[in-house]
Image (cartoon, helix red, strand yellow):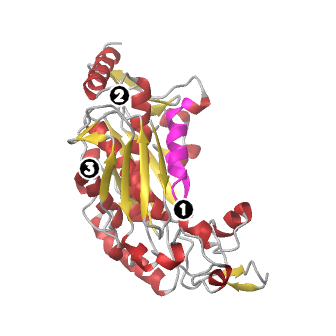
Amino acid sequence: MRFLTAGESHGPQLTVIIEGLPAGLYLTAEAITKELFKRQGGYGRGRRMQIEKDTVEIMSGVRHGYTLGSPVTLIVRNDDHKHWLNIMGTAPIEQSAKEDMKRVITKPRPGHADLVGGMKYNHRDLRNVLERSSARETAARVAVGAVCKILLDQLDIEIFSRVKSIGGIKDNGVYSVETIREKNDANDVRVIDDTIAQQIRDSIDAAKKAGDSIGGEVEVTVLNAPAGLGSYVHYDRKLDGRIAQSVVSINAFKGVSFGEGFKMADMPGSAVQDPIAYDEGYIRLSNHLGGLEGGMTNGMPIVVNAVMKPIPTLYKPLQSVDIETKESYQASIERSDNCAVPAASIVCEHAVAFELARVVLEEFQSNYMEQLIEQVKAHRDRVRHY
């Protein structure tokens, strides 16, 4: 399975093409839209989320509610495009009109793709870079992940996420998987410990008042993934490597780990490895490694940790350089959130869902859903009695 996305932040729409889904998967636009609404929420979001009411339209690959096995095309229309028709139109314009065009960007933002993207593609208006490098594209990735979550649910594989910290305020509670599942949406900053939620909101507000931004850490948990997904044979088939690449490709994500993650650097091997036991199937007596051994799932919950840096658009911008005059200026200001960590946890959840669904479809025959369900069930029975 693979997918492509297309579209600019203020263009008419985002387009997704997903290839490789089995036939017979029950799929509705409403189910995908429900996941997109989650991405739009969270404390710290900017005015764009008040403008856009992200809804999905299914354009191909589905008939009467069921996938056909052919490519599925999804679109998410950008409601704000109507205010950008002259700026983001596709038709050619005269040179004189180019010179009078509004919202031309020549002062790149530190930490964004603006300057390097302009140098790479030789753009003189950095809007040509930021329109595609914008986190608006993650709406398309959530749409893909929503389809994957629907598929995984048919295989009794569950995925959810939470926020572990924002702006240095950490949720240090030790929780059961059941507690995290039940309370991951208990508040608008998506922490389990509701007693720190207001402290986090105050920190987000303080950063906004100061014209600054803050980041944080998120966690994604996968339950009931069958053992043996992925491979130890080649580097590019190791599942933890594939998940890591997918997660770090999300805008502003700069680090990823599994299980105890970077804490393991300070732990002895006896405290890191997960002892093996047998109880109607192989289990681990702990889960420090986060459900992955040798690039493969081991049947325990998969636990993915990821770090999001503060968003680079600042309302009190840092020093930059005008690419035309080469003089020092403050960086450009684009409409932005000042904290998107709660929303980013949703994006991360859906990025992991895609990688899990992709490896499942590679591992098992999957021309149609009944075949896939039977294959996964037979595999679970076999490894249980290995």
Residue of label 3: 181
**In the displayed structure, does residue 258 sit left or right of residue 332?**
left
Number of other residues with Cα within 10 Å of mark 1, as a class: few under 14, some 14 to 19, many 20 or more: many
Label 3 to label 2, Cα distance in Å?
A: 19 Å
Label 1 to label 2, Cα distance in Å?
A: 31 Å
**Residue 246 belongs to magenta span:** yes
Quadrant including the N terminus? top left
Kind of residue indicated by mark 3 = Arg
User: Residue 299, how many percent across, how many down?
Assistant: 36, 29
Residue of label 2: 226
From this viewpoint, is residue 8 visible?
Answer: yes
User: Residue 186, how many percent across, how many down?
Assistant: 24, 62
Number of other residues with Cα within 10 Å of mark 3, as a class: few under 14, some 14 to 19, many 20 or more: some
Q: In this view, does 87 lie above or below 11?
A: below
Kind of residue indicated by mark 2 = Pro
User: What's the residue at 55%, 79% (across, down)?
Assistant: 314
Q: Nearer the viewer, residue 165 or 334?
A: 334
User: Residue 242, how many percent across, how many down?
Assistant: 52, 39
Span shown in magenta: 237-257
Q: Nearer the viewer, residue 291 or 286?
A: 291
From this viewpoint, is residue 172 visible?
Answer: no
User: What's the residue at 51%, 79% (across, down)?
Assistant: 86
Residue of label 1: 252
